[in-house]
Image (tube, helix red, strand yellow):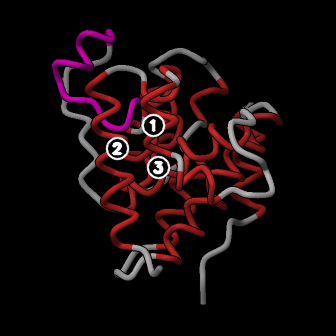
Amino acid sequence: MPYTTSKTDVEILRKAGVSEADVRHCLKVAEKALEIAARTAVEIDHELVGRGALFHDIGKAKTREMDHGRVGAEIGRELGLPAEITDIMEKHSRGGLSESEALELNLPGRDYTLRRLEERIVIYADRLVDIIMDGIVELRDEREAEERFEEILKTIPKYGKNPLTLARYLGYHREIQGLMNK
C-alpha cells in the first residue's frame, strides 16, 4: 500500500510553528515527491520520501535563513524523528553542499552530499514545486516543470543558484528522469 502523509505529521509542523503557507508548501513537496517516487522503476522507501519532504522546511518555524535545514534537523531530533528524515532536513539546502560550500555559506563545515535516492527525490520535488508555485509553468500542467527543468534552471538564476548548485540539480533531474517509467 502506498504511503500517504499523516494528519499527525502535519500537526507536528503546525505545533512547531511552521506558517500555513510553509505547511502548504511542505504538503505540495511531499505530494510531488511521492508522485515522482511512484513513477520510478526502482525500489524506494516511500515513507522516507513522504516524511522527509513533509518535514524538510520545519526549520522555517525559527529562521528563513540558509541554516533553516540545520535548525530543522535539530527540531526533528528533539521530536524524535528518525535520522534518515533529519538528514534530509539538514542536507536539502542547495541540493546537498560540499564541506567547502557549507563553510562559504557560514554553515557547519561538513559534507551535506545527498547520498540516498530518496534524498535526491525530495530536493528535486522541492525545486519542481518552487517552479510550479511561482507560476513559471501552468499549474494544471505540472509535467511541464519536468520537461522544461533544465531550461528554467539555466535561464532563471533564482532556481539554479550558482554553477555548482545548478550542476547538482541538473544531475538529479537526469538521474531521476532516467529511472522513471515512461
User: SS for tag 3?
Assistant: helix
Above or below, 14 against 176 in this view is above
Name the mark on residue 73: 1
Q: Tag 3: residue type?
A: Tyr
Mark before the other along the chain sequence, 3 or 1:
1
Could you say which is closer to the camera, residue 69 or residue 162?
162
Query: What separation in Å lies between label 3 and label 2 (alpha carbons)?
Result: 9 Å
Residue ID at (19%, 33%) = 111
Relative image position of residue 170 (x, y in whole percent): 34, 44
Q: Quadrant of residue 31?
A: bottom right
Instruction: Indicate the secondary structure of the residue bearing disc 1.
Output: helix
Among numbered discs 2 and 1, the one appearing first in the sequence: 1
In space, the residues marked 2 and 1 are separated at their CA atoms by 25 Å
Query: In the visual, does 70 lie left or right of 68?
Result: left
The kind of residue on which mark 2 rests is Leu
Q: Amino acid at mark 1?
A: Ala
Q: For mark 2, what is the residue?
A: 170
- Direction from residue 65 to residue 133 in the image, left or right: right
Q: Nearer the viewer, mark 3 or mark 1?
A: 3
Look at the image and say whether residue 98 sits in the magenta stretch: yes
Can you give x and y, in whole percent of width and height, for residue 157 in the image?
A: 48, 20
Chain part drawn in magenta: 94-106
- What residue is shown with label 3? 124
